[in-house]
Amino acid sequence: MKNFKVDVKNVLGTVTREQIDSFNGAGANALNLLENGTGAGNDFLGWLHLPSSISKESLTEIENVANTLRTECEYVVAIGIGGSYLGAKAVISALSDSFAELKPSNGARVLFAGQNIGEDYLYELVELLKGKKFGIVVISKSGTTTEPAIAFRLLKDLLVAQEGKEFAARHIVAVTDANRGAMRQLANAEGYKSFIIPDNVGGRFSVLTPVGLLPIAVAGFDIKKLVEGAVAMEKATAEANDENPAYLYAKTRNALYNSGKKIEILVNYNPKLHFLAEWWKQLYGESEGKDKKGIFPASVDNSTDLHSMGQWIQDGERTIFETVISVAEQQHELRIPCDEADGDGLNYIADKRVDEVNKMAELGTALAHIDGGVPNLHITLPSLTEYYIGQIIYFFEKACGISGYILDVNPFNQPGVEAYKKNMFALLEKPGYEEASKAIQAKLK
């Protein structure tokens, strides 16, 4: 599978190969539950064979809409929260020039809103867009989720005020439910172009639906290559054996969990992967954190965080393990110059590629952490291209389903997410929450 690899040898000082393989039965059963659609949450398995079922025609339609927005707008704001935000943000960040926002652009820049309720953030976004031609991709099954609904109301009003209803109708795209909800009704009434969020795909598994594909295409990336990589991983993760990287990863992390390792830290040494880790945290946190069980997902960006979190990881409580994503090949080459005075003492690495130094930091850190009692899984990603990002997205999704079933939870619901909403609605005195409002006010006295 073009050198995508999961290596578990550096966990064997903490768990044995026999302990990992003791999950063979549970892992095979979990994979069968997924493939046969007989496990808990089986009405949300639309992601499972999504890559191989996406037609070229549907991808072309997404690309055509994206190209219209790219060429006719200076900015396109993708409005969504949770999986409706993090997947696209992760892929775009992984594939973008690190300083793209400071360089001339040959198409619309993608911005994000609806992922927070920060007043300053929204005010400053509105100020940026005043006098600019912009479009909106609003991603919401219901159209009533508080954070994106606030952002959409603000930006829709601004767009209509600046450009008129006709322009707004052509440059607002709704990604929403096929038949139900406030957003579907509005899209139909206003004539917005729309794409469907499949009923059987939850938000955190939706990157390869129009939820993720449309913003990614607007940003100028090849969604066909992204899907091609996911298809390759879909094929590679179909059988219950250790050639299946998702199966191996799921077994190993559960063996570590059973040994007392309650926190998994996703580690990268490429700053472009920061938001991939944020997406991964939602994927695993929402999928496994229930029934008072589940590995806590955390992340660090190294070598940066070696100078902040490194001490805790090296010497803190031994309840952690690390999963390290290593990017084998960089997109560019840069060598360290020689300096005659050598005041900084770096001539010993003169003429080495920066990535060689980074790889030695990665290896040295792994060795130190392993010696310090922190087992390491290792994922090799060949490079940061659409194809390989498609692979790792599907890999983590499939492994999450297997791992959740091994843990004996429903990986596809998120009942705990609703708790804060009920309190917020009660505090805001939303109609229908009168009794809850009284109860919560009494608590606060």
Image (cartoon, grey):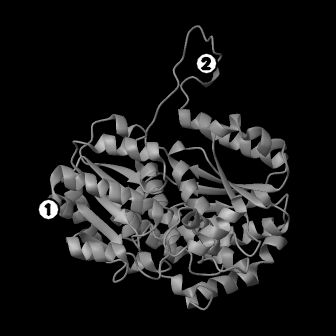
Question: Image check: 208 left or right of 163?
Answer: right
Of tags 2 and 1, the one toward the viewer is 1
Mark linked to residue 108:
none
Residue 66 visible, this angle: yes
Residue 221 visible, this angle: no
Dot 2 crowding, Cα within 10 Å, few <14, some 14–19, many 20+: some
Q: Name the residue: 33% across, 45% down.
A: 126
* First in residue order: circle 2 vs circle 1: 1
C-alpha distance separating marks 2 and 1: 63 Å
- Secondary structure found at label 2: helix
Mark linked to residue 347:
2
**Is residue 200 shown above or below 263?**
below
- Of 105 and 424, nearer the camera is 424
Residue 412's x, y, as percent?
A: 59, 78
**Is residue 167 shown above or below 271?**
below
Q: Three-letter amino acid code at disc 2?
A: Asn
Residue 47's x, y, as percent?
A: 48, 77
**Is residue 232 shown above or below 38?**
above
Residue 174's x, y, as percent?
A: 31, 68
Question: Image check: 134 left or right of 226?
Answer: left
- Of 193 and 366, nearer the camera is 193
The answer to which image quadrant residue 403 occupies is: bottom right
Q: Name the residue: 41% across, 78% down.
A: 52
Q: Three-letter amino acid code at disc 1?
A: Glu
Q: Which residue is mark 1?
A: 166
- Of 424 and 140, nearer the camera is 424
Q: Name the residue: 63% across, 69% down.
A: 438
Residue 213's x, y, as percent?
A: 37, 65
Dot 1 crowding, Cα within 10 Å, few <14, some 14–19, many 20+: few
The answer to which image quadrant residue 361 occupies is: top right
Question: Image check: 227 left or right of 311?
Answer: left
- Secondary structure found at label 1: helix
